[in-house]
Structures are given as structure tokens and as C-alpha cells.
Image: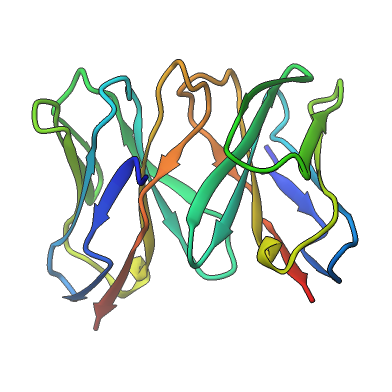
């Protein structure tokens, strides 16, 4: 059973556009929600993370929106660039689960010049 | 600080053999987690070690095992390899564990023939 559901599976965006990736979860014990970016042949790299006490977090062109009541969170990439083309994973973990990150299935983002 | 390092980067084994993968965490990090990444199952948590003790374990058979040394370096072992064990094995380290930021290494690509 997928603990974190991610959509879309793939996304094509024009340069300068906004990329939006959505995730949903069921386990209300989750208290940490990171987003990872992965390039081919590399390990995932932490992009941005949020905890449920805030509804939004912004770092540069990347913003996480978090809706605790709906158990959903999303990643917005503003002014998308060809260099952002990668696979993005949302994830979640709980204190009880220590460092057991449950990952979404990933979104392959392609930014067209 | 140097990042998480994993050795070897690539490995080819045959069914029935066993394999040992190594991970050196970021200096000062005491938690090491292991993940398996496959196209079909995505990123799945194997286990986590903190101060030489296994703190959490995912849903993998007993053929998958690990350990952590006093210097926080970790190894994972897979015995009696099966074709389905072909995957990218990722190691991640964090300073404290428990919903802490995890930093991933580049992974070890294991191919089982």
C-alpha cells in the first residue's frame, strides 16, 4: 500500500512556467514532509522540507504548500528552467518511524527551452 | 564537509551469491538509513542504524541485513541474491534521526545475473 501518493507521473513545462507536483498521505502521524530532486545516475538531493505547523514554505523558486486537513502537500517550481529537468519525489516520515521515509512514486519533470 | 560516500558504485553478481555494500556518512552524523530504488517499486526503506543499533526495519526478507560500526560507517549485506534484487541501493545519513534531514549518497548499482 502506497503511503504517499504522488501525481502527475510526468510533467512537461515551458521555460519560465510554473511546475506543480501534488502529494497526498493518509497517516496522520507523519510530521515531516521533504521533497527530493534526483538527476540520472545520482542520489536524491533534498530540495525543501516542511513540518505541519506551517502551511507554506518558500526557498528561492521552490515553494511547498501544505494542507493538513486535506492531508495534501504540493511543490511549486516558479520560473522553471531546463536545469530543473529531473525526477522529483515527495516523502513523509513520523517521529515514531525514526528515519523511515515513505516516498511517492516520483514525477519526471521536463522543462522545454 | 564531504558528502555521503558509497562503495562500490557498480556491482555485478550472479544469483545465489552474496554482496556487501559500504556507506560512509557525513562526518558527525550518527544515523544511517538504507533504501532500495527500483523502477517498479520506487524508493523503499530497508533499515536504519543509529549509534550501532538497528532502530527501524522495512518490509524486506531476512536476506537483507546491515550493521553500523563505532565510526558510524555502515554496511549492508544481501545473501542468496535473486534477480529481483537488482536495484540502486542508496544510503542516507542524518545527524540525529527522527524526522531529521537525510542526505543521500550516489548509490550502488547492483545487477544480479
Q: Residue at x 26, y 53 (%)?
A: A6
Classify residue B74 by image quadrant: top right
Q: Left or right: B53 with respect to A69? A: right
Compared with A111, A19 (above or below) is above
Q: Residue at x 81, y 60 (%)?
A: B81
Compared with B107, A32 (above or below) is above
Q: Residue at x 9, y 26 (%)?
A: A69
User: Is B40 in front, or is A91?
Assistant: B40
Q: Quadrant of the N terminus of chain B?
A: top right
Compared with A83, B20 (above or below) is above
Residue A58: percent from left, percent from top: 21, 38
As drawn, which residue projects farthest toward the right?
Answer: B17
Q: Residue at x 50, y 52 (%)?
A: B43
Residue A37: percent from left, percent from top: 41, 55
User: Is B64 in front, or is A9?
Assistant: B64
Q: Left or right: B47 with respect to B44? A: right
Residue B10: percent from left, percent from top: 78, 67
Q: Quadrant of the C terminus of chain B?
A: bottom right
Q: How is the image coloured?
A: rainbow
Looking at the rendered structure, the number of numbered marks drawn on it comes to: 0
Residue B74 visible, this angle = yes
Residue A44: percent from left, percent from top: 51, 53
Compared with B89, A55 (above or below) is above
User: Is A15 in front, or is A40?
Assistant: A40
Residue B106 visible, this angle = no
Amino acid at each position: 500500500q502506497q503511503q504517499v501518493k504522488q501525481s502527475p507521473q510526468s510533467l512537461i513545462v515551458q521555460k519560465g512556467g510554473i511546475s506543480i507536483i501534488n502529494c497526498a498521505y493518509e497517516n496522520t502521524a507523519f510530521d515531516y514532509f521533504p521533497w527530493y530532486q534526483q538527476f540520472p545516475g545520482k542520489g536524491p538531493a533534498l530540495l525543501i522540507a516542511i513540518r505541519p505547523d506551517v502551511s507554506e514554505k518558500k526557498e528561492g523558486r521552490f515553494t511547498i504548500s501544505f494542507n493538513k486537513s486535506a492531508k495534501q502537500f504540493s511543490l511549486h517550481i516558479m520560473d522553471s528552467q531546463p536545469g530543473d529537468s529531473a525526477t522529483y519525489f515527495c516523502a513523509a516520515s513520523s517521529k515514531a518511524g525514526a528515519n523511515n521515509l515513505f516516498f511517492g512514486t516520483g514525477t519526471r519533470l521536463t522543462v522545454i527551452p | 564537509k564531504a558528502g555521503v560516500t558509497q562503495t562500490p558504485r557498480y556491482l555485478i553478481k550472479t544469483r545465489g551469491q552474496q554482496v556487501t555494500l559500504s556507506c560512509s556518512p557525513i562526518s558527525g552524523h550518527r544515523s544511517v538509513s538504507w533504501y532500495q530504488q527500483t523502477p517498479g517499486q520506487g524508493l523503499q526503506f530497508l533499515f536504519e542504524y543509529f549509534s550501532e543499533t538497528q532502530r527501524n526495519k522495512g518490509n524486506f526478507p531476512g536476506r537483507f541485513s546491515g550493521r553500523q560500526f563505532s565510526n558510524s560507517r555502515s554496511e549492508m549485506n544481501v545473501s542468496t541474491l535473486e534477480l529481483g534484487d537488482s536495484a540502486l541501493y542508496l544510503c542516507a545519513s542524518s545527524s540525529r534521526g527522527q524526522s531529521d534531514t537525510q542526505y543521500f549518497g550516489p548509490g550502488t548499482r547492483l545487477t544480479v545475473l
